[in-house]
Image: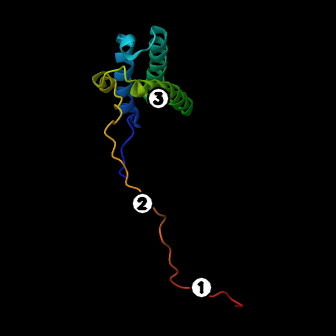
Amino acid sequence: MSYTKPYIPRADGQFRTWVEQFCWNIHNDPARYMMSPAEAASLMQALNRFLEALSVATDQRTRTSGTIVAKQDARSILQDLIQKYAAFIRANDGIDDDDKIRVGVRPRNVAHNRRQCPDTPPLLGCIGRVARAGS
């Protein structure tokens, strides 16, 4: 099994770029992603809270442990919201793959390979015996 990196970046700078693309594309055309304008607005509010907290937490004049925690909280709220919407978008066959890619969501892989499973359980053999004390 090979490792695939998560579709939502971990580093704050890359995360910011990715979520701005995600949120703005949905905000500009929520119907394309089968979302309501209210859902798009709540996504933008969470984005704006994160961007404000990120700005405060990365400015040397205002960077404190409290502002860093506030940024992490805002990011966590935004990321939870995005994961919910991204899962909906990914699973929705009514949304084109091009539109999914536009917001940074990987389309589902429909070309799965069937696994070849054996029809019988594996045979086990005994190689040796471990002697225990007192036997």
Count of numbered tags: 3
Closest to the observer, 1 or 4: 1
Quarter of the image with the C terminus is bottom right
Closest to the observer, 49 or 127: 127
Q: Amino acid at mark 3?
A: Gln
Q: Residue 93 location in percent, x, y?
A: 37, 24
Residue at horizontal 36 percent and vertical 47 percent from the top: 114
Residue on which disc 1 sits: 130
Residue at horizontal 51 percent and vertical 31 percent from the top: 72
Q: Residue 23 location in percent, x, y?
A: 39, 19
Q: State whether residue 6 is above or below residue 105.
A: below
Q: Residues within 10 Å of mark 3 (few under 14, many from 20)?
A: some
For mark 1, give the secondary structure.
loop
Task: Please tell me in which quadrant of the rendered image residue 94 appears.
Answer: top left
Q: Check if mark 2's residue and mark 3's residue have beta carbons within 8 Å.
A: no
Q: Amino acid at mark 1?
A: Val
Distance of mark 2 from mark 3, alpha carbons?
A: 37 Å
For mark 3, give the secondary structure.
helix
Q: Earlier in the sequence, mark 2 or mark 3?
A: 3
Closest to the observer, 11 or 62: 11
Q: Residues within 10 Å of mark 1 (few under 14, many from 20)?
A: few
Which mark is on residue 118? Answer: 2
Is there any visible trace of residue 59 in the rendered image? no
Residue on which disc 3 sits: 83
